[in-house]
Image (cartoon, rainbow, N blue to C red):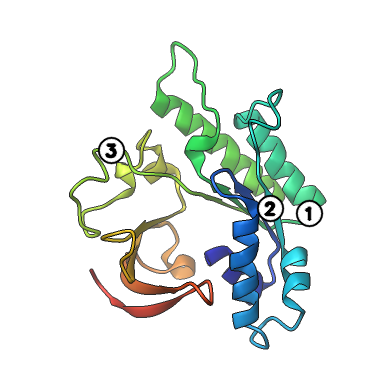
Amino acid sequence: ALCANLARLHGLRGAILQFEDKPDRNLKDLLAYARSWAGQGISEEPHAWVDRMFKTIAPAEDQDEETDFNLAWLRDTIEEAATRHSAKWVLVDPWNEVEHVWRINETETGYTNQALRELKRLTRRFQIALLIVTHPSKAGGMNKGIGEMSLYDISGSAAWKNKADHGIIISRETPTAIETHVKIDKSKDFKTMGHPGVVRMKYEPERASFSFVGTGA
């Protein structure tokens, strides 16, 4: 929904690196989004708008056994999205599906810091936004309300809190809960990105969009 808003409100094309879902699911949601916003920033036929604004890349290990989906592959794929598809944002969903291998004398924190530093350098070079979906660690995601959750709870490393320009936490009390909590845990530039805080949103599947419910947990 965030990426679709970037496309509709700002005219920014993008690429979705989707590891866990099939492209058909993304297409279904994007078409629902395009139909629901017809005439409100989307004047094209829904399929035409989606085809023009979104490039979906769905790596499949079972179909491409010779490719290592590692950090080098990710850098090349981001560069290709920016140069060949004119992407202004790239969504990696999720980070843990990329193959991460650090040296024997290197910690996971050290690897993650270096990886994010390289990726930020790449995004500055091509002037694009990089959105990375990550999951909480088992300990970080247990028995915490949205107010207690932070980027430090992400599986792998505190680098996510330190390196991110903008950190968003999405939480539902149950998988079928109507309300979704959206917490801005970090905002590096308040004037541009807004202030940290929590809002409650309602997801509307038929529109593939969120509507505002209220502020606070």
Q: Secondary structure at mark 1?
A: loop
Q: Outermost residue, top direction?
A: 104
Between 166 and 39, the residue placed more toward the observer is 39
Q: Secondary structure at mark 3?
A: loop
Residue shown at 52%/27% (left/top)?
Answer: 100
Q: Which residue is mark 3?
A: 138
Q: Outermost residue, bottom direction?
A: 39
Between 189 and 129, the residue placed more toward the observer is 129
- Give the class, few, some or many, for how many residues have Cα within 10 Å of label 2's Cα (few <14, many ≥20): some
Q: Which residue is mark 1?
A: 85
- Give the class, few, some or many, for how many residues have Cα within 10 Å of label 1's Cα (few <14, many ≥20): some
Give the residue type at disc 3.
Answer: Lys
Q: What is the spatial separation of the Cα atoms under label 2 and label 3, in whole angstroms?
A: 30 Å
Q: Position of residue 39 (x, y in %)?
A: 68, 88
Q: Which mark is residue 56?
A: 2
Give the residue type at disc 2.
Answer: Thr
Q: What is the spatial separation of the Cα atoms under label 3 and label 1, in whole angstroms?
A: 37 Å
Q: Is residue 185 visible?
A: no
Q: Earlier in the sequence, mark 3 or mark 1?
A: 1
Q: Which mark is residue 167?
A: none
Give the residue type at disc 1.
Answer: His
Q: Quadrant of residue 169?
A: bottom left
Q: Is residue 216 visible?
A: yes
Q: What is the spatial separation of the Cα atoms under label 2 and label 1, in whole angstroms?
A: 11 Å
Q: Position of residue 7 (x, y in %)?
A: 65, 69
Between 202 and 108, the residue placed more toward the observer is 202
> Closer to us: mark 3 or mark 1?
3
Q: Is there CB contact under 8 Å for labels 2 and 3?
A: no
Q: Outermost residue, right direction?
A: 84
Q: Quadrant of residue 181?
A: bottom left
Q: Position of residue 23 (x, y in %)?
A: 65, 53
